[in-house]
Amino acid sequence: MPDEWSNKDFAEDWDNGGAAKHPVRKEHLDMLISIISDGYSSDKYILDLGYGSGQVEEMLYAQIPDANIVGTDNSDVMIELSKKRLGDKFSKLTVINHSLEDIEALELPKGNYQYVISVQALHHLTHDQQKKIFQFVYNTLGSGGSFLFIDRIALDVQTFEQSYKAIYEKMFNKPFEGYKKDIEQKGDYPGTPEEHISWLQEVGFKATCLNKKFDRAFILGVKK
Ligand SMILES: C[S@@+](CC[C@H](N)C(=O)[O-])C[C@H]1O[C@@H](n2cnc3c(N)ncnc32)[C@H](O)[C@@H]1O
């Protein structure tokens, strides 16, 4: 079953613990926050595509209280959860309810966008849709800006099953068969890090994989 972001129980479950179940998420979010805290210029903008319940914004505002952040999402339920999470900080955030499937029609507040981030929000979209989003991100960023992209990646389980199984079972203490079934049922379209890097290069980015662990990668695209 695909993820149901408009279902209140599903969204609350993810927000209350599901998100934290993957040990690599925290590692990648810590890297993301370090990069932005170190490089952010106060007059610039950060765009978060699929910002969800505001977990990343909570971390960003803790480090940079006056950050100019624009968050997009198309789930009213997740947006409502972000309102609860951020409290009085919610009014600082510019929220745009918009589908990533229609990225070309997304209208953003005018500004110099230094960072675009997207965390676990693109892997269910087709490769063509993901490429359109990469093009939009490139067009949105100012010169020298960065795209910080964290997501689930495709694994070649057929070829490397024994190693992936061993890593998964050590990491999650659960049988790998369950993971395989779950992934099959979701019917998503994650790319490999190599694909993401080549799609980013095609639209003009310098790109690299900053970190990859099991089925999660942190990809960086820089607009020179
Ligand atoms: C796994 S959550 C991640 C939320 C947030 N980025 C984080 O890491 O805390 C995925 C988010 O992407 C949003 N999303 C999924 N498909 C979308 C689409 N087509 N358009 C806009 N948002 C979408 C969901 O509503 C959800 O809030």
Image (cartoon, grey):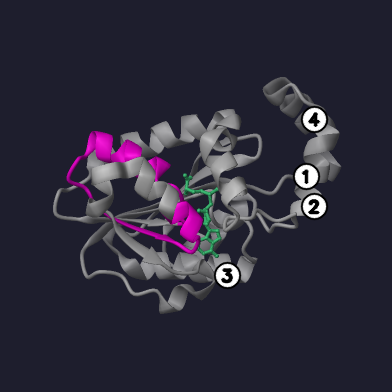
Residue 89 place in picture, x, y as percent: 25, 45
Asked whether the viewer can see residue 122, the reply is: yes
Give the residues in magenta.
50-79
Upstream in the sequence, badge 3 or badge 2? 3
Q: Are marks 2 and 1 in contact (CB under 8 Å)?
A: yes
**Label 4, on which residue?**
165
**Distance between the alpha carbons at the discs numbered 2 and 1:** 5 Å
Residue 80 place in picture, x, y as percent: 42, 53
How many numbered marks does the figure carry? 4
Q: Are marks 4 and 3 in contact (CB under 8 Å)?
A: no
**Distance between the alpha carbons at the discs numbered 3 and 2:** 21 Å
Depth check: give the residue in front, 135 or 30: 30
Looking at this view, name the residue that lies furthest to the left: 43
Q: Are marks 4 and 2 in contact (CB under 8 Å)?
A: no
- Residue at disc 3, secondary structure: helix
Residue 101 place in picture, x, y as percent: 54, 71
Which quadrant, please, contains the N terminus? bottom right
Residue 10 place in picture, x, y as percent: 62, 47
Q: Residues within 10 Å of mark 1 (few under 14, many from 20)?
A: few
**Label 3, on which residue?**
129
**Label 1, on which residue?**
182
For the point 33% across and 67% down, the residue is 140
Q: Which mark is residue 185?
A: 2
Q: Are marks 1 and 3 in contact (CB under 8 Å)?
A: no
